[in-house]
Image (tube, helix red, strand yellow):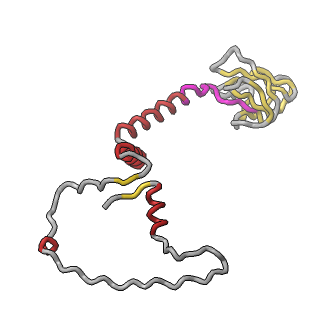
Amino acid sequence: MTRIVGLSALLVALACLPASRTFAADAPPAPPTVLAPAEPAAPSPAAAQPPATNATAPAAAPVASLMFTPQEVQAIDKAFADHLHPPAEQVAAQVNAAALQQAQIEAARPRVPNIYVSAVLDFGGGEWTVWANGLKLTPTHQSPLFHVVSVSGNTVEIVPIAQPSTHIRLQPYQTWRARQGDVVEGIIP
């Protein structure tokens, strides 16, 4: 049995249509064709024997195509098979590439987190309370990631521990983005 590929499948389908078929809306329908049942064939001696068992799969049937050479059909079949069931080496290479890409993303992430200020209370005389990155900070209780250097009104000056040369000035509801190095409105954890 052969597989029919491409244009030949369309030609076979068209050849199977009855010749009396019309597509006009006002044409009467054609009477159905009745086929007589075929007479059963006499059993052959080869058919009476049980099929031989073979450990290997039977060879694939040749492919008939009007558009492609047999070599092109084989290449197409191989491409489909490789797409549906890629070789183990290809899967392993994809997994390794994904792991390498994830490691590169992690390496590019800044070690310093974004710093955001939620609220500032300046009591005067060096007494203040700042809520930054979800922590309540005072002159005696600082964050392990950054230090509040000064508070003046509602402006806070912050120095990240990992970047001591960077001085950041933030007001409530502002965020210093570590990767971009800029200050934006809003809280961005």
Give the quadrant of the N terminus.
Answer: bottom left
Please determine whether, in this image, residue 83 is positioned above or below residue 19.
above
Q: In the depicted view, which residue is nearer to us: 58 or 185?
A: 58
Q: In the depicted view, which residue is nearer to us: 51 or 94?
A: 51
- Residue 70 at x, y = what percent? 35, 46
**Looking at the image, which residue sits at the far front?**
19
Horizontally, residue 154 falls left or right of residue 145, namely right
Whether residue 147 is in magenta: the answer is no
Horizontally, residue 84 falls left or right of residue 163, namely left
Q: Which residue shows up at 40% across the image and 52% down it?
A: 65
Please determine whether, in this image, residue 133 is positioned above or below residue 78.
above
Whether residue 129 is visible: no
> Which contiguous range is marked in magenta?
105-116
Q: In the depicted view, which residue is nearer to us: 91 or 96?
A: 91
Query: In the figure, residue 116 lies in which quadrant?
Result: top right
Query: In the figure, residue 136 lies in which quadrant?
Result: top right
- Residue 104 at x, y = what percent? 52, 27
- Residue 11 at x, y = what percent? 46, 61
Q: Which residue shows up at 68% across the image and 30% down it?
A: 114
Whether residue 30 is visible: yes
Q: In the depicted view, which residue is nearer to us: 24 or 168?
A: 24
Q: Which residue shows up at 82% across the image and 30% down it?
A: 171
